[in-house]
Amino acid sequence: MEEIAKIKSFSDLIAWRRGHELVLFIYQITKIFPQNEQFGLVSQMRRAAVSITSNITEGFYRGSYKEKKHFYLSARASLGELQNQLLISRDIKYLNLDKFTEISQKSVEVHKLLNGLIRGCQRMIK
């Protein structure tokens, strides 16, 4: 069980940490995609993945819970975009089923963590 410590930086957030792992994994797996996808699916997947952690970071530094929630919702939307692109990658055989399953599980974990951040903000707004 992880020890609960004072969160001083965006990188202390478990959602950001797992999101960062997801970004690194996306960069790793897209290296094997066909060269003709570098400005298509590869670029879109990498952008969506980076957007997840970027929005978590921006939300962390916002002053109000309403603003924080907005950026955490944006991170979740980028995650949804990435999940769609993963399905496409699987269906056109750029990802085998094992890699797809592994990265899908990582994305579901990030989704749950984002939902927790969003719920936390919502409680503070009321």
Image: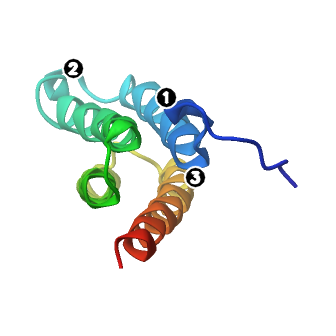
Q: What residue type is labelled 3?
A: Glu
Q: Nearer the viewer, mark 3 or mark 2?
A: 3
Classify residue 43 as left or right of residue 98.
Answer: left
Please give the residue where the numbered disc 2 appears in the rendered image.
Answer: 35
Q: Position of residue 58 (x, y in %)?
A: 31, 37
Q: Which amino acid does label 1 sit on?
A: Leu
Q: What element carries label 2?
A: helix
Please give the residue where the numbered disc 1 appears in the rendered image.
Answer: 24
Please give the residue where the numbered disc 3 appears in the rendered image.
Answer: 102
Q: Where is residue 120 in the image (x, y as percent from the top left)?
A: 48, 68
Looking at the image, is mark 1 or mark 2 earlier in the sequence? 1
Looking at the image, is mark 3 or mark 2 earlier in the sequence? 2
User: Which disc is residue 34 wearing?
Assistant: none
Q: How crowded is mark 1: few (under 14 residues within 10 Å), some or many (20 or more)?
A: some
Q: What residue type is labelled 2?
A: Gln
C-alpha gap between disc 1 and disc 2 = 19 Å
Q: Which of marks 1 and 2 is in front?
A: 1
Classify residue 125 as left or right of residue 116.
Answer: left
